Image (cartoon, helix red, strand yellow):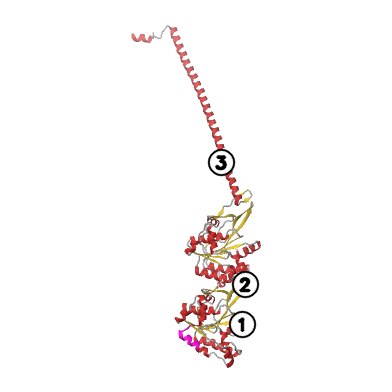
Amino acid sequence: MEQIKKTKPSLLAKTPTGITGLDEITNGGLPKGRPTLICGSAGCGKTLMSMEFIVRGATEFNEPGVFMAFEEKADELTVNTLSLGFDLDKLVQEKKIRLDYVHIDRSEIEETGEYDLDGLFVRLSYAIDSIGAKRVVLDTIENLFSGLTNESIIRTELRRLFQWLKDKGVTAIITGERGKDTLTRQGLEEYVSDCVILLDHRVKHQISTRMLRIIKYRGSLHGTNEYPFLIDSDGISVLPVTSLSQGNEASSERVSTGVKSLDEMLDGQGFYRGSSILISGTAGTGKTSIATTFAAGACERGEKCIYFSFEESASQILRNTKSIGLDLEKHLQSGLLEICASRPTLYGLEMHLVDIHKRIKAFKPDTVIVDPITNLITIGSISEVKSMLIRLISFLQDQQVTVMFTALALNNIVQEQTDETISSLVDAWLLVRDIESNGERNRGMYIMKSRGMKHSNQVREFVITDNGLELVNVYLGPNGVLTGSAREEQMLQEHAGEVLKGHQMSAKDKEILRKRNILEAKIANLKAEFESVEDELNRVYTEEQIKKEAARKNREEITNRRRGLSSAEDPDENNIEE
């Protein structure tokens, strides 16, 4: 029995588009040598995307391209694409691209009753051969069949067109307008195309969002989600973050918060690099001050930081931070800091995400600040904001970028929803709250969580000064933690008590010294009295001894006299003379 050898199937060859994010979604680009259909309603970006495909191919991949238009003339295309930074005239002169406009007259089609694309094939073949084109765009295909009602002819010519492009070996994009219940008006193009990309320009709550979805891709895996894309002065940017997975490495390096006393609460070292931090609290509690201090600290270390502000303009941030001793302007001038200020209603959530993604890719920061994320609730629900932040955090973690969010607590309900929904996404959560007592308002800071590190569970008073931020050590009074003037008053009272205690101790020391002196004087007097008595006793004893000696001598003298001997007539002396 003959054995059938199994061979590994070859991977589908692909042509990179050069469009930011699109090659990632398609796992390498569009099918090489095959036609791709880009469809969508008017104004969704079909022409711009296909034009960028041609321009990127000519400038980045050395693949000349032909752009054949059925609606816009060559000079109109040149003017329209200048807004994307594409100089089509220069590329045409360098023979890297060829622009061709084909006018289709509907009345002529209706009069003849017969229709084929042989003339188009001849013209298109000449354009391809003239520059050695590898890429072709036909924009838009509906104009080729305008006025025709015979579906059999349309189907036949469509198949001929797609097969002709395959035989020519060019990677082609064909644009088509979306039908009522179909992807295109004819409803046939999507079936004969090897790859179909649907563009959508939707408006929700008066805010527009552009979305891209790959309907099918023969012979290749591809992203199946909807992806937001942005059209700006740099062309089209597609955001593929919905395809990101949690496979990033966790860093053990620590970065300072910029506030020494806050670092001490975080095991003395600060946050982990590449982690996500949430600073939440009511208005006026100093969330932005913490964020700008964190940004300034990163710049002082020579790291790059990008600050996304949805509340204040760049000039307001620079002015306000000077009041706490921060000079962010020098970091702007040095290129270490970039401030991107915009209103939340400028884009939809997805478009904001694309814009943030694009700016981060271009600036390559070490630290990102988003202030505040709760302003995004005005253009989407909390669940939609959470979905956006999940993708943003995943992207930043993959890049090892540390991100700090601030969140405004508008009221108890919103605060609870924000805390429960958003705080679960981040690695560290700092809560700043108002502490009202003794008719004044003070700030207290809590570290609600900090994954993977020891952190203080104490409440610290958060003080904003002219020289920066400071966390005052916990001060316990008779009735608990004291803040503000109550803390100052208690400290003054205790200081006064220490002074009074010191004074009392000094008075006691003096009294003790005085009593000691008196005691020592008494001891000296007693000692003098003792010595006087001792001397008197010694004198009496001496006198008694003298008296005894005198009495003894007197007795001896009397005895001698009784014997008749005088002291001068010593019998011994007479014996010696003899």
Q: Which residue is mark 2?
A: 206
Query: How far is the residue under mark 1 from the one under mark 3?
Result: 92 Å
Q: Earlier in the sequence, mark 2 or mark 1?
A: 1
Magenta-highlighted stretch: main secondary structure?
helix
Q: Which residue is mark 1?
A: 179
Residue contact at pointers 2 and 1, CB within 8 angstroms: no
Q: Whole-percent x and y of residue 63?
A: 47, 81
Looking at the image, is mark 2 or mark 3 nearer the viewer?
2
Q: Whole-percent x and y of residue 457?
A: 59, 56
Residue contact at pointers 2 and 3, CB within 8 angstroms: no
Residue at horizontal 62%, vertical 72%?
Answer: 206
Look at label 1 and name its amino acid. Answer: Gly
Look at label 2 and name its amino acid. Answer: Gln
Q: Which residue is mark 3?
A: 502
Q: Judge whether residue 142 can be spotted in this image.
A: yes
Query: How far is the residue under mark 2 from the one under mark 1?
Result: 24 Å
Q: Whole-percent x and y of residue 15?
A: 50, 80
Q: Residues within 10 Å of mark 2 (few under 14, many from 20)?
A: few
> What range is drawn magenta here?
123-136
Residue at horizontal 58%, vertical 47%?
Answer: 491
Query: How far is the residue under mark 2 from the one under mark 3?
Result: 72 Å
Residue contact at pointers 1 and 3, CB within 8 angstroms: no
Position above or below: 275 against 535: below
Q: Whole-percent x and y of residue 199?
A: 58, 78
Position above or below: 174 against 553: below
